[in-house]
Image: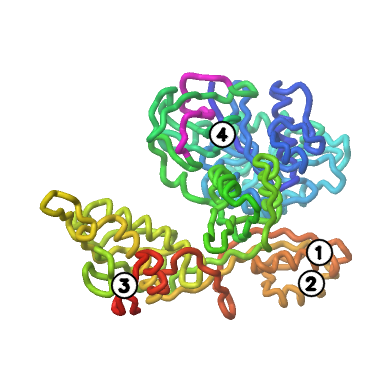
Amino acid sequence: MATLNLGILAHVDAGKTSLTERLLYAAGVIDELGSVDAGSTRTDTLELERRRGITIKSAVVSFPLRGTTVNLIDTPGHPDFIAEVERVLGVLDGAVLVISAVEGVQAQTRVLARTLHRLRIPTLIFVNKVDRAGARFHELLDEVGARVSPALVPMSRVDGLGTRDAAVTERVDLLRLADHDDAVLAALVEERTPPPVRAHDDVHPVFFGSAITGAGIDALIGGIVDLLPTGRAPGRGGTVFKVDRGPAGERIAYLRMFDGVLRVRDTVGEDRVTGIRVFTDGGTQPRAELTAGQIGTVRGLGHVRIGDTIGVRDAKAQQAQFAPPSLETAVLASRRAELHAALAELAEQDPLINLRQDDERREVYVSLYGEVQKEVIQATLAEQYGLDVSFRETTTLHIERPAGAGAAVEYNKVAPNPFLATVGLRVGPGDGVSFQLAVEPGSMPAAFFVAVEQTVRETLRQGLRGWPVPDCAVTMTHSGYSARQSHAHAVFDKSMSSTAGDFRNLTPLVLMAALRDAGTVVHEPIHAFTAEVPADTVPAVLPLLARLGAIPLATGAHGIDGEIPAAKVHELRRRLPGLTRGEGVLESVFDHYAPVRGKPPVRERTGPDPLDRKEYLLRVVNRRLTPSQSST
């Protein structure tokens, strides 16, 4: 039986989880439909999900569907939990993008659609809520064509649109696709049979229906089975896309196998697989092995993290697809040690939490996508760890990028360098952080090169003004060390021989000197926004946008599209209703980083500061320095 790993994606409240319930019901996995409002859905298992009525963690459920085994992954729709969607994308064969027939294409819808297209994931579009007042058909198709993809194939029509009795019948309309596909156009003109419709990265079949009433679901199921390919994702081995904790605190890895077999008692790195459960028939069953195409949970991998691979996987499938969090806040609790341990566990399940500890102020910082995520962290710490926490005010997380090229070098046994190491580094603009050698790899022990690279990546978490430097190309231009030396009785003398610690201690000084030579530019996160406002209120909204540093890019019947600094989104959302008779609705998502206009903000540094040589050496070496060593 073929296996299809299917993702259900949508903007929050488009009906994604309700659609998942309907598919489970149609497949016979559940006897009655669960309700998001009642907190009784199959895939929203966390108490917090049931209470809030939103999906927070991705969930997997497997079932047979017309001869195909479907592993369905329900993902969060709220933009604060985009990290959960991020890690699922690499394990999908196909996707269903859910759009509300009433609200239409929303901010998160466009983000998801662009990402699915970029990853070339075959995607069906399901227009939900045709039974709701205000539901649209032709206008909605025009909107999807303009904002998602013009290459659409409507697969159904709706009678009684916008009423509880809305009925859906199958009807394939190739006219829209003909405008974008010469082969289809030629077939229609010549009255030949057009090529078969298949979902791929350029063509999206569109189904209409209602997850609540069941209208149009049979047609969608047919599309899932017949139009989406199975076993699409490339690569060998498997990918961990989720990590949970079991009742005893043990790690449980969610793994999709692409090729090969993983068996109980197999060794993975330092760990040994102690148990496997495969998703099947609405639940999981213990198995001796996990085979190609299957998704399962694996126990025994105590060191595993999200994104880890089992075997060999295609590198492209591991690249980040969404922007990192653009907000940060300090988490405060009286039981600090327990707080840090709890947050460390949460960071295993969500690496983008990105813990940052300030030992001097005894505070721990977490990165965020939004305020809802902060509420979830607070509730999780209270319910799972018994910790009552509060937060400092959320601040915008800026980044620094090199303004040009810079270089620095310090030589072994040459003042003012107190370390037994030679390190030379050249920095410049890059795409992500890269590290390469311009010296012979055999010029010193491999462990010393590893120490330099690891320290480079750690040091770039704080640039010249304290912000992360996520895009920087670093090249090691000079290397040197003191070989291992011993006294007459063969006792190793660390004071005469280089160690990895020498390279770890020297690298921050050289790297920051090179970065200072290059200079950095502080960038702020910019959101793309849509302000849905009555047409007659646009003149009142535009001056507010100007004061907030927003740039309107287009106005239309739906309102205003534009860009705005992330730091100003909250104020725009707060003030918009007062200018639009309470009718204004704002949707925004991260779009890009842009240089800060005006004086760049500075973030206080944590740990030893390599920009202050004397202070850094006092803390790192912990000894009195000579005047030559303390000079800059």
Numbered disc in front, either 3 or 1: 3
What's the residue type where badge 4 is placed? Gly
Give the quarter of the image for residue 216.
top right
Q: Looking at the image, is mark 4 or mark 1 earlier in the sequence? A: 4
Q: Secondary structure at mark 3?
A: strand
Is residue 576 rendered magenta in the image?
no
Label 3 neighbourhood size at 10 Å, few (<14), some (14-19), many (20+)? many
Nearest the viewer among 137 and 244 is: 244
Q: Residue at x 18, y 54 (%)?
A: 484
Label 2 neighbourhood size at 10 Å, few (<14), some (14-19), many (20+)? many
Is residue 291 rendered magenta in the image?
yes
* Residue to which mark 1 is pinned: 533
Q: Position of residue 570 (x, y in %)?
A: 73, 64
Label 1 neighbourhood size at 10 Å, few (<14), some (14-19), many (20+)? many
Give the quarter of the image for residue 36.
top right
- Determine whether label 2 and label 1 are within 8 Å by CB: yes
* Residue to which mark 2 is pinned: 541
Numbered disc in front, either 3 or 4: 4
Q: Position of residue 223 (x, y in %)?
A: 64, 33
* Residue to which mark 4 is pinned: 249
What's the residue type where badge 1 is placed? Val
